[in-house]
């Protein structure tokens, strides 16, 4: 049996191939729609183009393009042809792209036409054989060449453990590493989520996420494709327009920032969301205020889940009421088929609600880091569990709460301080919109706790007063030595706060 992920996705296409698979919501003029037949023919032609280039087995195809349906078809075509897909954030500049190309050594790069000059030079110098262009308006040399190819293609035979994609970690703590994901990793996770989240053929997904990341490329796209469900496609997130399209959809996936932006729109009402079945949030922690405000404004309870590039999805709050409640501030129990354990510093299992290191194993867990044998070995325990680097706890019902990253752990005066715990207290204080807690070098304590806050609109914050309030709520060693008020926190493309930037900024605070 062919274990190629594309074969499973293609099998899920509906019998009526002329039905709409993807509607471009932000197309100018007449609505631009792609049928399932368009996806079948387009991926076949692109796959045949790849095969015509006689690329070596296992070749990487790198995509440094803006979001488009054609970019999604390129991903599917790479799978279909049996090569390895390498998605790259289109915001990456020359130095960043140079690193990824030299590290992954792709045989082919697809980039925006506007970047061809500098991107092709980097690629050719690194040994990449082919560079094609693909633009948001469906122009570029990739599609021009593919137009001459046959629209029939036999899906390449692949085993479950064959490499399908390399996803570079976001690099919030040092150089990015390439997580190697197999066809089996991706398909097992997609099938689990299809069952758990109740995907149906009559679902309609609003796809407003980027497609260079696990959330948009895998979780969202695979979910709809494996269900044979239509997508309403936004190349760019527009909160007012997304809310308007809730009337035509049933599922929405977003990062917390997208939910916050929609909460600022007067059009967000229970009536506007009446046709929706499911709202899902991930990629960054969802503030409890956002969780509560969304329920009050929309009449829906957000489903928060937890995953990472190396493992895809790991946990999820329940979708169906019979499976339990969705609990704000948690990411729910481990997914079916996923084993998750939390160990203390001694390496022993944590008690209920005891904080420790999260480790996982299962068919969704990646095979290792690209060309980093020793690093891969370090990230797995001797008995085969992947060390996520996240710190968390599990309650009596099995619901997991993420407390923070182990690399974010602050050791002040010999005491462990978990930033997420302090952020929880700060976010409850009047006038605080959000917070980030970091540790910076301190001569006496080793590390000192520092907080960076964003005020709610129309509010002013007094750092000294906030510190005095915290001293009445938590142990003294947890209280920030200093609080800074900023307009916004630095974030990466998926909304995660870049704490490494904050640590660098305040590194010399206590000489």
Image (cartoon, rainbow, N blue to C red):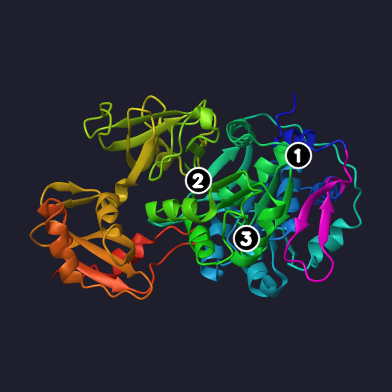
Rendered location of residue 480, percent (x, y): 18, 61
| Element on which disc 1 rests | loop
Horizontal arrangement in the rendering, residue 119 relative to residue 455 (left or right) = right
In the rendered image, residue 28 lying in the magenta stretch gets the answer: yes
Compute the Cα span from label 3 to label 1: 23 Å
Tell me the mark number nearer the camera, choosing from 1 and 2.
Answer: 2
Give the Cα distance between marks 1 and 2.
Answer: 25 Å
63 or 318: nearer the viewer: 318
**Residue 30 point in image, percent of width and height:** 85, 67
Q: Which residue position is annotated with label 1? A: 228
- Give above or below for 196 relative to 215: above
Position of 271 compared to 456: left or right? right
What is the CA distance from the residue labelled 3 to the residue labelled 2?
16 Å
Badge 3: few (under 14), some or many (20 or more) residues near its Cα, within 10 Å?
A: some
Q: Bounds of the magenta span?
A: 16-37
Q: Which mark is residue 243?
A: 3
Please name the residue shown 50% across and 31% down the image: 335
Is residue 308 visible in the rendered image? The answer is no
The residue under the point 69% across, 71% down is: 116
Residue under the point 35% across and 36% down: 358
Query: Which circle's residue, 3 or 1, is located before the other in the chain?
Result: 1
Q: Earlier in the sequence, mark 3 or mark 2?
A: 3
Residue 301, label in figure = 2
Q: Considering only vertical position in the picture, is 250 above or below 319?
A: below
Label 2 neighbour load within 10 Å: few <14, some 14-19, many 20+ = many
- Image mark for residue 328: none
Query: Tag 3, which secondary structure?
Result: helix
């Amino acid at each position: 049996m062919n274990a190629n992920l594309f074969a499973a996705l293609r099998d899920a296409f509906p019998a009526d191939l002329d039905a709409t698979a993807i509607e471009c919501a932000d197309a100018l003029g007449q609505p631009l729609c792609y049928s399932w037949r368009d996806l079948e023919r387009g991926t076949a032609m692109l796959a045949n183009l790849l095969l015509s280039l006689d690329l070596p087995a296992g070749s990487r195809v790198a995509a440094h393009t803006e979001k488009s349906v054609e970019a999604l078809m390129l991903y599917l075509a790479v799978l279909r042809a049996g090569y390895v897909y390498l998605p790259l954030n289109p915001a990456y500049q020359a130095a960043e792209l140079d690193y990824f190309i030299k590290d992954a050594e792709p045989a082919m790069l697809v980039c925006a036409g506007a970047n061809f000059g500098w991107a092709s030079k980097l690629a050719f110098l690194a040994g990449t054989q082919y560079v094609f262009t693909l633009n948001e308006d469906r122009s570029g040399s990739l599609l021009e060449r593919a137009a001459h190819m046959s629209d029939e293609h036999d899906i390449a035979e692949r085993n479950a453990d064959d490499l399908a994609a390399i996803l570079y970690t976001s690099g919030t703590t040092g150089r990015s590493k390439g997580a190697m994901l197999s066809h089996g990793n991706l398909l097992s996770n997609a099938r689990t989520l299809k069952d758990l989240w109740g995907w149906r053929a009559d679902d309609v997904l609003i796809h407003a996420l980027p497609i260079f990341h696990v959330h948009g490329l895998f979780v969202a796209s695979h979910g709809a494709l494996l269900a044979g469900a239509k997508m309403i496609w936004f190349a760019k997130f527009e909160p007012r327009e997304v809310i308007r399209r809730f009337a035509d959809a049933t599922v929405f996936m977003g990062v917390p920032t997208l939910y916050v932006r929609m909460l600022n729109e007067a059009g967000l009402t229970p009536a506007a969301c009446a046709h929706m079945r499911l709202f899902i949030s991930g990629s960054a922690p969802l503030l409890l205020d956002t969780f509560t405000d969304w329920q009050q404004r929309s009449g829906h309870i957000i489903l928060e889940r937890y995953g990472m590039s190396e493992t895809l999805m790991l946990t999820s709050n329940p979708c169906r009421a019979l499976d339990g409640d969705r609990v704000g501030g948690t990411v729910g129990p481990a997914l079916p088929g996923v084993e998750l354990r939390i160990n203390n510093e001694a390496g022993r299992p944590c008690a209920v609600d005891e904080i420790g290191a999260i480790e996982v194993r299962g068919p969704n867990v990646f095979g290792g880091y690209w060309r980093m044998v020793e690093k891969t070995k370090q990230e797995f325990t001797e008995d085969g569990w992947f060390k996520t680097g996240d710190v968390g706890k599990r309650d009596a019902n099995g619901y997991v709460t993420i407390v923070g990253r182990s690399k974010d752990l602050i050791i002040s005066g010999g005491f462990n301080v978990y930033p997420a715990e302090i952020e929880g207290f700060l976010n409850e204080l009047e006038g605080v919109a959000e917070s980030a807690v970091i540790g910076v070098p301190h001569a006496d304590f080793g590390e000192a706790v520092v907080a960076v806050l964003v005020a709610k609109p129309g509010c002013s914050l007094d750092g000294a007063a906030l510190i005095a309030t915290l001293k009445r709520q938590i142990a003294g060693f947890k209280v920030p030595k200093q609080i800074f008020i900023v307009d916004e926190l630095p974030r990466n493309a998926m909304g995660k706060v870049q704490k490494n930037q904050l640590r660098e900024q305040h590194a010399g605070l206590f000489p």
